[in-house]
Amino acid sequence: MSYETLLTDIHGDGPLKTGVITLNRPKAMNALNDQLMDELGAALLAFDRDDAIGCIILTGSEKAFAAGADIAAMKDYDFQKVYSSNYISRNWETIRSVRKPVIGVVQGVALGGGCELAMMCDVVFAAENAKFGQPEITIGVIAGAGGTQRLPRAVGKAKAMDMLLTNRWMDAAEAERCGLVSRVLPADRVMAEALAAAEKICGFGRLAVMATKEAVNAAYETPLSQGLQLERRLFHSMFGTADQREGMDAFVNKRKPAFNRG
Ligand code: CO8
């Protein structure tokens, strides 16, 4: 399938491959308009449904992961339009329903909805030039795609308030220090490292990978006792998989496991 605002590509030569989605509105610094978000939703779901794909990478350009919602499009919206169309949740929730891991690769700015999109990824690799911010307050609104909820969970209330109320941006080093991103890498290596990490994930058992993502995400939404119960049940369910037998047999026989052989 081809898109007007995205590029898609498939990498890897193992049984499971990596689907790469590149946001591609260079003239608007990948501003997230409805078309882009609809296409992004479709591309994510297509990779999620594809049995040959084990991991997804979401990235932008060297200058911009995404500069936020498209302000030129939004400026004429009124309450009636955004409320009745449920603006944002219509196409922004799709990424949450993806069950395979999504690695965000951020170069340049991740602002407003761009920062929120990065926070919806499961793992975030940032180039040294990455910058994260929530500048919505400077254009008379507030964050609307999870910024006031995910940012405090990621970096703590004090830093989140500072970013949301004063429009202070975080550089990559600070973002890594306070837990907003997983790794910081030189710009010329960040994509290669993300592809290597994705390939590693693709080499593990598909069900164990999906169950890990499901269990970690539950940590955000459930009390500890329920989260631990879910983790235990998912752990038990692994004993119904061929990958559990393969992984443990390979360990005791000192050989490399071969997961996902179909
Ligand atoms: N929307 C539309 N166009 C944009 C956006 C944007 N968010 N960001 C940049 N552009 C366009 C510029 O208008 C410009 O276009 P043109 O060349 O036609 O004039 C082009 O991209 C290049 O931008 P600049 O000339 O400004 O480039 P600079 O390098 O000087 O600055 C910045 C880059 C810092 C990224 C600057 O453009 C900027 O501050 N952009 C706006 C950032 C912002 O405020 N983002 C938050 C938007 S609100 C939001 O995200 C709410 C999220 C709610 C959920 C999302 C629902 C969809």
Image (cartoon, rainbow, N blue to C red):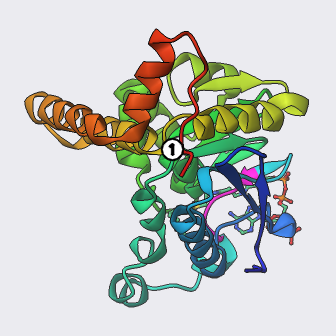
Which residue is rendered at x = 75% and y = 38% of the image?
195
Which residue is rendered at x = 87% and y = 68% of the image?
27
Of residues 232 and 174, the one nearer the viewer is: 232
Of residues 7 and 17, the one nearer the viewer is: 17
* Residue interval drawn in magenta: 65-70
> Looking at the image, how many numbered discs can be counted on the residues?
1
**Residue 68 lies in the magenta stretch:** yes
Which residue is rendered at x = 45% and y = 55% of the image?
143
Q: Residue furthest right?
A: 188
For the question of whether residue 150 can be seen, the reply is yes
Q: Quadrant of residue 186?
A: top right
Of residues 238 and 21, the one nearer the viewer is: 238
Classify mark 1: helix, strand or loop. helix
- Magenta stretch mostly in which secondary structure? loop
On the picture, is 231 further left or further right than 5?
left
For the question of whether residue 142 can be seen, the reply is no
Ligand 1: does it lie within 8 Å of the C-beta at label 1?
no
* 162 in relation to 53, above or below: above
* 158 in relation to 120, above or below: above
Q: Position of residue 44 (x, y in %)?
A: 57, 65
Q: Position of residue 211 (x, y in %)?
A: 35, 41
Q: Amino acid at mark 1?
A: Met
Ligand 1 quarter of the rendering: bottom right
Query: Counting other residues with Cα less than 10 Å from the Cα at mark 1, is it few (<14), some (14-19), or many (20 or more)?
Result: many
Q: Quadrant of the N terminus?
A: bottom right
On the picture, is 222 further left or further right than 31?
left
Q: Quadrant of residue 133?
A: top right
Which residue is rendered at x = 50% and y = 19% of the image?
250
Find disc 1 in the rendering and name its residue: 119
Q: Residue furthest front?
A: 253
Of residues 158 and 102, the one nearer the viewer is: 102
**Residue 11 lies in the magenta stretch:** no
